[in-house]
Image (spheres, rainbow, N blue to C red):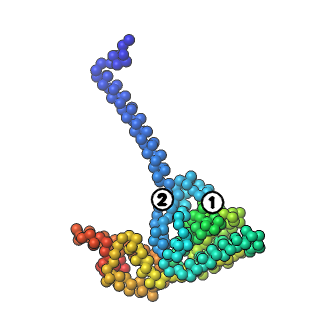
Amino acid sequence: MASFFDRFNSKQLTIVIVCITACFLMMGACTMVLGNEGEESKEKKLVIDDDDDGSDVGGRKYKFTDKEDRSEGGEEGDSVNVKKPIEGDPYKELDELIGLDAVKAEVRSLANYVKVQKQRQEKGLKTPNLSYHLVFTGSPGTGKTTVARIVARIYKDLGILKKGHLVETDRSGLIGQYVGQTAPRVNQMCDSALNGVLFIDEAYAITQSDAGADYGKEAVATLLKRMEDDRDRLVVIVAGYTNEMKKFIDTNPGLQSRFNRYIHFPDYSSDDLYKIFRQYLKKNQYTITKEAASYLKEQLDYAVEHKDRNFGNARFVRNTFEKTIQAQANRIAKAGKVPDEELVEITLADIKSAI
């Protein structure tokens, strides 16, 4: 029997062989693409952003992008800011924060109270109804987000929460633009925070007039219902400017009954801001000259003395640090080849360019 290839002349046979080879190559390419997509989906489940709170230089913000990685609930494709619990002693991390002495004392006092009440419950003794929800008051950049994450871990250690993660949101994550959008958004955030803490920054904006009065009331009503329905596995911390937060809590009796513990975050002193800047230097392997350090202290003193309501505290320091290392990079690039020690040194010229 003649073989399959005998029926073709040499020119036709060449064409057939080329076609068969091309088919095999395409099949191999498809297999590689599908395999790579599978690996990529595993690798890209978390998007990491810098923490926005300068008092904790090493913090990170996590955004879930894969449904199976969410704490609980949530729709596929949602972008939820989640700070996963860090291994280690939360009390040690609390003590290592710069400044915030009164805040640290309040958090430890809260932990002691909860611990003792749980011990009383275990012995069958009467205990008052405990509310684990908190109100953080203070200006931007004073460490509220960082401390909220630590509180979540403390609650986990005390057995109040199973996971101890932190879900961070604000008005934009809760208020819908159209009728019927607000309640699902609030429920989605609460689902993501189950067994952890839902942290609502600038919570007072929910009920401000420009946010839509009806939508704001709907958001609060939905939140209160979830706090009641999931009271054993959901803790809510609301944060914002002092006066605005007090007005926000007073708008609804349900908020007043559930949020009865306040922790105030004072502005940082200029000395604390300088320590935070030095912390950034150490973490990122930079040094600073004496002249630059002296000038930086003077500028921080001036900034604190003349600050307004919108002063960013630790965020101001973080921005100054970022501008400083950019100025250093520009200076070195312009100079060309420099000694190794200059790659880590921050000079007076760098600081002056940044402030």
| Label 2 secondary element | strand
The answer to whether residue 145 is visible is: no
- Image check: 144 left or right of 336? right
Q: Residue at x 31, y 80 (%)?
A: 289
Residue type, numbered disc 1: Asp
| Mark 1: few/some/many CA within 10 Å (<14, 14-19, 20+) | many
Picture coordinates of residue 182 (x, y %)? 63, 63
Residue found at the very far top of the displayed protein: 1
Residue placed under numbered mark 2 in the picture = 47
Q: Residue at x 48, y 70 (%)?
A: 52
| The N terminus: image quadrant | top left
Q: Residue at x 33, y 16 (%)?
A: 6
Picture coordinates of residue 251 (x, y %)? 67, 76
Q: Residue at x 48, y 50 (%)?
A: 41
Q: Which one is nearer the viewer's eye here, 301 or 281? A: 281
| Residue 14 to residue 254: above or below | above
Picture coordinates of residue 296 (x, y %)? 37, 82
Return the disc, 1 or 2, that comes first in the chain's sequence: 2
Q: Quadrant of residue 345?
A: bottom left
| The C terminus: image quadrant | bottom left
Q: Give how far apart the Cα atoms at labels 1 and 2 are.
A: 20 Å
| Mark 2: few/some/many CA within 10 Å (<14, 14-19, 20+) | few
| Residue 130 to residue 303: above or below | above
Q: Which one is nearer the viewer's eye here, 205 or 159? A: 159
Residue placed under numbered mark 1 in the picture = 191
Marking on residue 82: none
Residue type, numbered disc 2: Val
- Image check: 23 left or right of 114? left
The answer to whether residue 240 is visible is: yes
| Label 1 secondary element | helix
* Number of residue marks: 2
